[in-house]
Image: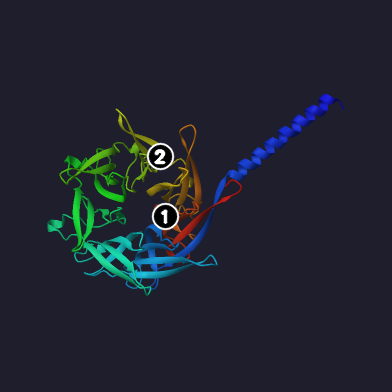
Amino acid sequence: MSHLRRHGFLITAIFIAVMVWAFATAVHAQIQYQFKLLHGFNESLTDGNGPEGPVVFDQEGNLYGATFSGGAYTDGTVYELTPGSDGQWTETILHNFINSLTDGANPVGVVIDSAGNLFGATSHGGSKSEGTVFELSPGANGQWTESVLWNFCSLPNCADGAGQSVPPIRSSSGDLFGATTAYPGTVFELTPSAKGWALTTLYTFCSLPNCADGEDPMGSLTLDSKGDLYGETTSGGSCSYDLGCGVVFTLRPQANGLWQETVLQDFGTSEEGIGAGGGVTLRDHALYGTTQDGGQFGCANLGCGTVFELTHIAGNGIHEQLLHDFGEQSAQGIAPYAAVTFDPHGDLFGITLEGGSPTCECGIVYGMKPQDNGKWGFEVLHSFVGTDGSTPNATPTLDSKGNLYGTTATGGPGEGGVVFELSPTAGASK
């Protein structure tokens, strides 16, 4: 064999080896998610039914959440899941709600402070049967004490609002901010003092003609470092469809103590999105959110929903960019719901209420990654099939290891919804 032929074979061998290494490295770099069911709820007197709202963690790694119904009085629960050394999680019911004048009913989630106190909201119950904001405090003996911080519809003519769909958010000073959903909806602030908690209604929607400022705020609020609030409404705005397509708004405190609302995005056409009710997430001076309907692709003539980004461009106001348009394939999910969440790398995660597995269309968990060309890649991380849960309805929660935690409102082994974990594992392409 000539020297040139041997040299050619050597180059070919090296090329093949490099390609094999590159392929193996690319495959190894891809991430797949392993699903684990942490708890399946069942409609009984000893367990909750229909978890609502995101789950939260304390400093010891215990997980907390709320169920809309179930429990000893069938009016919902707050629960704790504790991880064991064997990898199993143990549930403890911290509070059973009862629809009464002194307690709320149908909780919609909880948030936690650094001391381990839980704060949440109920959509019903309380002294006026219009919902409450509550606190659960841990005691030395393992018992938890509930305090009702506010009963809605307590102000004249119910100016403080009624009904809630998500728990309030907590500021660094300990104030609570939330929204009521009963027409036309309000945004409120609860401030603690030595005399108890005082409520201030920051804004009442439908204050402009034809509800151009939005109507029925839904989803979580976001608070920035300047003290400005951001959120969404499911209806209102200039869209001619039904009652409006919804808006993204901001509320800014003024020197006179009042708050001024500004509509950042008016979903004026169905192509831009309809029903922006999951709440927005603030990252790097941009807002990210979802609409349950609308978009470019057909889905019962309304579109199947969108993921969007709002950025401020100097001299040109607010610019909307659709990052993903659902509806081309139901396997990729239908009706994205709740706010999205980000990992430290800038990857985005969310859920859809429907779509996914063709045998169930019980919803999915999805991930999105920004690409070099300015577009976003989209991937289904898990499709629910009913036995592992159905209808996820809350923003996924990320831990420091990149694990995703969430809930489904129905399905699972007990048909009452589940709490699940999705753990990233390096391996072959999904």
Is 312 or 386 nearer to us in this picture? 312
Q: Residue at x 46, y 64 (%)?
A: 39
Is 127 or 196 nearer to us in this picture? 196
Q: Mark 1 points at which residue?
A: 392
Number of marks in the rendered image: 2
- Of tags 1 and 2, the one toward the viewer is 1
Taking 142 as reference, is 335 above or below it? Answer: above
Taking 276 as reference, is 80 above or below it? Answer: below
Q: Give the image location of residue 222, x and y in percent.
A: 32, 48
Residue 357 visible in the current orientation: no
Taking 336 as reference, is 84 above or below it? Answer: below
Q: Quadrant of the N terminus?
A: top right
Judged left or right of residue 124, residue 331 is right
The three-letter amino acid code for the residue at tag 2 is: Gly
Q: Residue at x 56, y 47 (%)?
A: 31
Residue 62 visible in the current orientation: yes
- Badge 1 marks a residue whose secondary structure is strand
Q: Which of the 4 image quarters holds residue 62?
A: bottom left
Judged left or right of residue 361, residue 425 is right
Q: How crowded is mark 2: few (under 14 residues within 10 Å), some or many (20 or more)?
A: some
Residue 120, label in figure:
none
The three-letter amino acid code for the residue at tag 1 is: Pro
Q: Give the image location of residue 277, x and y in percent.
A: 32, 48
- Badge 2 marks a residue whose secondary structure is loop
- Mark before the other along the chain sequence, 1 or 2: 2
- Measured in 3D between alpha carbons, the distance from the residue under mark 1 to the one under mark 2, in whole angstroms, is 23 Å
Q: Which of the 4 image quarters holds residue 200?
A: bottom left
Is 360 or 281 nearer to us in this picture? 281
Residue 298, label in figure:
2
